């Protein structure tokens, strides 16, 4: 730590929210939970807006890198050189990384952890797989298992507002899912498999079904909650994938087959890399959908599984064997309104009302397990957040917009320069001229307000 650096008693949360395309609400809920519930002061910083130059002069007691920064894919993570250099320079800061979707691009993740000396990882893997994964490939000293999402109070309030008695629900069984690529493994395909198998067997049952795996039938926001509120029952499986591709072999084989014009079916992949990795290190968890169904008192009919220890068969849900050999028994159980009521009340009690899976309880555990056990202590009095905030204002959403648009227009300039000259160039000049009456006065006021801030 340089002599000119200011020590900040609290934590910096690096996250990523695209300026042009908003993420799911569950991501925002997870990001905001740290500042909302932690005993430690938290400062949030969106990496999409670029590195604020005055951040270099601050040293936080802890730096938490949120899972939204680790975008899946071969491209670099959502951290520019400024943030990466800052991570390396902050040798006295306790560094924590959160991960989801850990089934692919594993070597890239392991290299990041080693290179930037991350000291604590929150993973969706169960502890029994730690030795085969992070302890084998990285030097991270502390691993903590967590679930991808938690119960947000606004979700519970929405569920309470939209709740309908069981007898008033017009749909017997509902469900939505999207197909997953075959390199997720057999477990990743269960979301579609349960829908197809259930519809095939239930078509003569007299049940009113609203089950779909088509992308165009997906629902979002309050429409999703209204749909669930109209369902007596809901299908479900564990979330995640059954193949954690630790050596990056399965995805590479899949892409090679596609490039060669071959059909990369799961049967074809099982003859090669997938056959070596599927179910060796499964990534199977509960998800926000299970909590939403519990909050809306939908009776869940689900494949048997662990569900991160949150749901147990015939206590919280009606179990379905994966070959549906107990389909008739499950349907008979579902037809008993008293049993449905018992299961839904149990699920609401244990998953929602108990607070066991709330964001508040999650952050309490994070404070204790990650920060307090690392030797950090919450400040005894009030923290002057305004002083730190002033040093984090150098990043602007307009920089992110320019970066996203700039990449697209640069591609157009390189590939189709004539089209670029006829469209982007005149549009840019027109926008510049039209914005002058607004931008120039605002810029002048901004300069006056920022005088003396260094």
Image: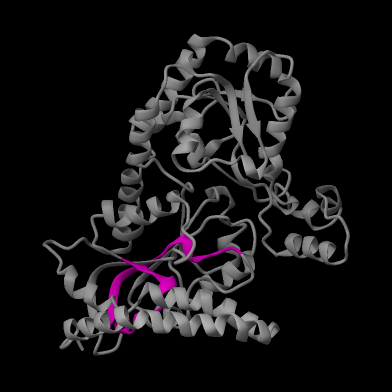
Relative horizontal placement of residue 17, taking residue 355 as reference (left or right): right
Any part of residue 90 in sight: no
Measured along the vertical axis of the image, is residue 288 above or below residue 38? Answer: above
Residue 237 figure quarter: top right
Q: Nearer the viewer, residue 275 or 412?
A: 412
At 21% from the left edge and 89% from the top edge, which residue is drawn? 454
In the image, farthest residue toward the left = 381
Q: Nearer the viewer, residue 178 or 382?
A: 178
Relative horizontal placement of residue 323, taking residue 111 as reference (left or right): right
Residue 63 within the magenta-colored segment of the rendering: yes
Measured along the vertical axis of the image, is residue 94 above or below residue 124? Answer: below
Any part of residue 128 in sight: yes
Q: Position of residue 3 (x, y in %)?
A: 24, 90
Q: Which residues are magenta?
A: 44-72
The number of callouts visible is 0
Quadrant for the N terminus in the image: bottom left
Residue 86 figure quarter: bottom left
Q: Position of residue 442 (x, y in %)?
A: 25, 79
At 66% from the left edge and 82% from the top edge, which residue is drawn? 419
At 54% from the left edge and 72% from the top edge, which residue is drawn? 112
Measured along the vertical axis of the image, is residue 302 above or below residue 396? Answer: above
Relative horizontal placement of residue 420, taking residue 389 as reference (left or right): right
Q: Position of residue 165 (x, y in %)?
A: 42, 17
Q: Position of residue 304 (x, y in %)?
A: 62, 30
Residue 198 within the magenta-colored segment of the rendering: no
At 46% from the left edge and 82% from the top edge, which residue is drawn? 430
Q: How is the image coloured?
A: one colour
């Amino acid at each position: 730590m340089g002599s000119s650096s200011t020590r900040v008693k609290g934590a910096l949360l690096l996250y990523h929210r695209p300026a042009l395309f908003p993420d799911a609400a569950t991501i925002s809920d997870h990001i905001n939970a740290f500042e909302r519930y932690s005993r430690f002061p938290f400062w949030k910083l969106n990496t999409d807006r670029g590195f604020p130059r005055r951040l270099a002069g601050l040293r936080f007691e802890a730096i938490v890198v949120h899972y939204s920064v680790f975008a899946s894919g071969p491209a670099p993570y959502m951290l520019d050189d400024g943030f990466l250099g800052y991570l390396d320079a902050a040798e006295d800061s306790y560094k924590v990384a959160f991960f989801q979707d850990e089934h692919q691009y594993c070597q890239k993740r392991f290299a990041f952890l080693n290179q930037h000396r991350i000291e604590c990882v929150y993973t969706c893997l169960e502890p029994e797989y730690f030795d085969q994964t992070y302890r084998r490939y990285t030097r991270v000293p502390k691993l903590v298992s967590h679930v991808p999402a938690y119960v947000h109070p606004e979700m519970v309030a929405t569920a309470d507002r939209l709740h309908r008695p069981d007898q008033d629900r017009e749909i017997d069984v509902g469900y939505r899912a999207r197909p997953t690529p075959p390199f997720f493994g057999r477990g990743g395909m269960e979301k579609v498999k349960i829908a197809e198998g259930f519809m095939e067997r239930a078509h003569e049952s007299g049940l009113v079904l609203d089950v779909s795996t088509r992308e165009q039938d997906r629902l979002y926001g309050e429409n999703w909650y209204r749909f669930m509120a109209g369902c007596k029952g809901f299908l479900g499986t564990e979330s995640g994938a059954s193949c954690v591709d630790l050596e990056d072999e399965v995805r590479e084989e899949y892409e090679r087959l596609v490039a060669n014009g071959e059909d990369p079916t799961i049967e074809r992949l099982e003859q090669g890399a997938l056959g070596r990795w599927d179910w060796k290190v499964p990534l199977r968890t509960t998800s926000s959908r299970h909590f939403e169904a519990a909050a809306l008192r939908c009776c869940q009919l689900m494949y048997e599984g662990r569900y991160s220890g949150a749901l147990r068969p015939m206590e919280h849900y009606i179990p379905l064997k994966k070959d549906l050999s107990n389909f008739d028994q499950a349907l008979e159980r579902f037809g008993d309104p008293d049993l449905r009521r018992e299961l839904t009340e149990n699920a609401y009690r244990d998953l929602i009302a108990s607070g066991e899976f709330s964001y508040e309880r999650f952050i309490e555990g994070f404070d204790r397990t990650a920060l307090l056990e690392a030797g950090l202590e919450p400040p005894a009095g009030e923290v002057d957040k305004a002083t730190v905030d002033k040093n984090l204002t150098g990043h602007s959403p307009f920089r992110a917009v320019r970066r996203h648009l700039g990449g697209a227009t640069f591609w157009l300039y390189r590939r189709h320069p004539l089209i670029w000259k006829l469209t982007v160039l005149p549009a840019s000049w027109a926008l510049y001229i039209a914005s002058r009456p607004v931008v120039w006065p605002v810029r002048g006021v901004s300069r006056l307000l920022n005088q003396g801030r260094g």
